[in-house]
Image: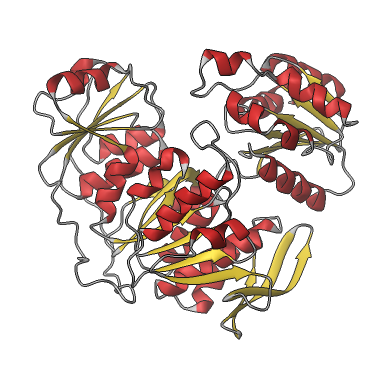
């Protein structure tokens, strides 16, 4: 049943304007969506729930549905959205103006079919987010890896600097109260995903490209097609816009070669616009001097987010925050406090001397840097990795890269592949045992255990005090981490 709760206002302080805001950007949420009825299918996801909150602030009459109850839906109900659990045609209001649906919603969804039958306008999540971004000064964070962390960093910096941003992040961030937030300031920060070329719908004034690698090969025909999509994203910035790219990524350089916006670079070389130097670390937590245009900008200390890769994420976030008018000292203070999104090398608990960590990494590069970071933090402890492959097509296309990614693990346990989107033919062409066989052929210690329960039983029986267990993947492998904590206790 749909439940409606009266809207509660959100108070905030007056916010200073962003530097170089275009004159058509307004301070308040006046919009073409006021009083329009908008229904969101799959509203519980991080991005969709954030979009719903923004639409409520725009004055829209919002309803939505999702398969199961979750905290994000409770928050939306408190803000005035009518929320239904489960998908059914009757969930769509009779006078609905627009139906928005997430990438996870299939063409056979009963609500999507009902909207088509009625002739209601249907928009993908990214299409609607792009329309909302036109009401604000948009800052978009793109890249194959690091998007959620960098978007969260930037949103946290802006909030701590009292810029009161609106933000939409593809992960839950405890310090921000979730994966999304609606502010009264002029800035909208959004994670810009390349899947299905969805980021081409966004209209940012400022952006970053963190890196470009092969991924989502179920919708891209190789790296050249991915670069072309990123080029389209970068080309969408206006001539008075600015994009900060990884200056050590050749693919990123190609993507911005012919765009109208100003291009800046970040990296470690002398020619980078934003350069990290004087780098040091303590058990995997890095600190460095940030140089801007060959002049000292700030000393950055990442006290709560381990890993050398976080230097690049922090540099990109600092550059964008600078263009948003935040002072260097405020940027450094916020980054020192920042603890990262959930499922980014998150500690789930330690029982009997066995430390259990969890991470979202599901691409070979992400796996390698995460395992390397764990080794930096815990150099003398035996490492168990439980990796759940995410999507059959990704596993098949990147099989050789995956097989080379676990060399620093003492033990690797692999359950069945987490199903996402793929056809029956693709699912039949690859399985987890293929990955394990390839790793064993490379000399790795890997074991295929199809179910979560089998893995939990194996670790409980074999792991010893002093060991580290790391669960990894974009599916529901985190449930193994939580069950391990319960069983070990």
Residue located 40% across and 48% down the image = 199
Image quarter in which the N terminus is found: top left
Up the image or down, 444 lies above or below 422; here it is below
Q: Identify the image quadrant of residue 89.
A: top left
Q: 317 or 468, which is in the foreground?
A: 317
| Residue drawn at point x = 48 percent, y = 23 percent | 421
Above or below: residue 13 compared with residue 103? below
Residue 165 location, x and y as percent? 35, 60
Q: How many marks overall?
A: 0
- Left or right: 410 in relation to 22: right
Would residue 459 be seen by someone viewing this image from the given angle? no
Above/below status of 209 relative to 300: above
Residue at 15% x, 53% y: name it.
31
Residue 283 in sight: yes
Residue at image point 58% right, 60% down: 313
| Nearer to the camera, 163 or 149 | 149
- The quarter of the rendered structure image containing the C terminus is top right
Horizontal and vertical percent position of residue 193: 45, 45
Residue 436, how many percent across, how many down? 79, 23
Q: Where is residue 488, by image quadrant? A: top right
């Amino acid at each position: 049943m749909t439940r409606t709760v009266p809207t509660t206002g959100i108070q905030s302080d007056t916010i200073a304007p962003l530097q170089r805001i275009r004159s058509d950007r307004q301070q308040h949420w006046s919009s073409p969506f006021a009083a329009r009825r908008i229904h969101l299918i799959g509203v519980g996801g991080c991005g969709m729930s954030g979009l719903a909150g923004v639409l409520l602030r725009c004055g829209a009459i919002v309803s939505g549905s999702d398969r199961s109850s979750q905290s994000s839906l409770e928050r939306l109900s408190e803000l005035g959205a009518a929320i239904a659990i489960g998908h059914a045609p009757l969930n769509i209001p009779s006078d609905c103006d627009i139906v928005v649906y997430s990438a996870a919603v299939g063409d056979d969804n009963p609500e999507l079919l009902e909207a088509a039958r009625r002739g209601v306008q249907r928009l993908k999540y990214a299409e609607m987010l792009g329309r909302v971004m036109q009401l604000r000064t948009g800052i978009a964070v793109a890249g194959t890896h690091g998007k959620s962390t960098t978007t969260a960093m930037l949103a946290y910096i802006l909030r701590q600097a009292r810029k009161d941003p609106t933000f939409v992040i593809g992960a839950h961030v405890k310090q921000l109260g979730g994966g999304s937030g609606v502010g009264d300031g002029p800035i909208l920060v959004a994670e810009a995903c390349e899947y299905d070329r969805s980021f081409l719908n966004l209209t940012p004034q400022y952006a970053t490209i963190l890196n470009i690698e092969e991924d989502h090969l179920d919708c891209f025909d190789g790296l050249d097609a991915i670069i072309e999509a990123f080029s389209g994203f970068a080309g969408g910035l206006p001539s008075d816009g600015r994009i900060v790219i990884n200056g050590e990524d050749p693919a990123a350089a190609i993507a911005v070669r012919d765009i109208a916006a100003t291009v800046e670079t970040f990296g470690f070389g002398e020619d980078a616009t934003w350069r990290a130097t004087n780098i040091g670390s303590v058990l995997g937590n890095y600190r460095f001097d940030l140089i801007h245009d060959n002049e000292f900008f700030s000393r950055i200390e990442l006290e709560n987010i381990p890993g050398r890769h976080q230097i690049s994420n922090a540099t990109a976030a600092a550059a964008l925050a600078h263009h948003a008018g935040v002072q260097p000292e405020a940027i450094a203070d916020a980054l020192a406090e920042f603890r990262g999104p959930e499922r980014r090398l998150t500690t789930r608990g330690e029982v009997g001397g066995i430390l259990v960590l969890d991470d979202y990494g599901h691409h070979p590069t992400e796996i390698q840097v995460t395992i390397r970071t764990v080794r930096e933090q815990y150099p003398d402890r035996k490492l168990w990795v439980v990796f759940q492959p995410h999507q059959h097509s990704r596993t098949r296309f990147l099989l050789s890269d995956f097989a080379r990614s676990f060399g620093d693990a003492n033990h690797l346990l692999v359950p069945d592949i987490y199903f996402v989107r793929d056809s029956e033919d693709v699912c039949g062409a690859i399985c987890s045992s293929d990955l394990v066989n390839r790793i064993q052929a490379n000399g790795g210690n890997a074991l295929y255990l199809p179910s979560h329960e089998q893995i939990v039983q194996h670790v409980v029986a074999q792991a010893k005090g002093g060991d580290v267990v790391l669960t990894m993947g974009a599916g529901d492998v985190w449930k193994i981490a939580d069950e391990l904590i319960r069983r070990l206790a």
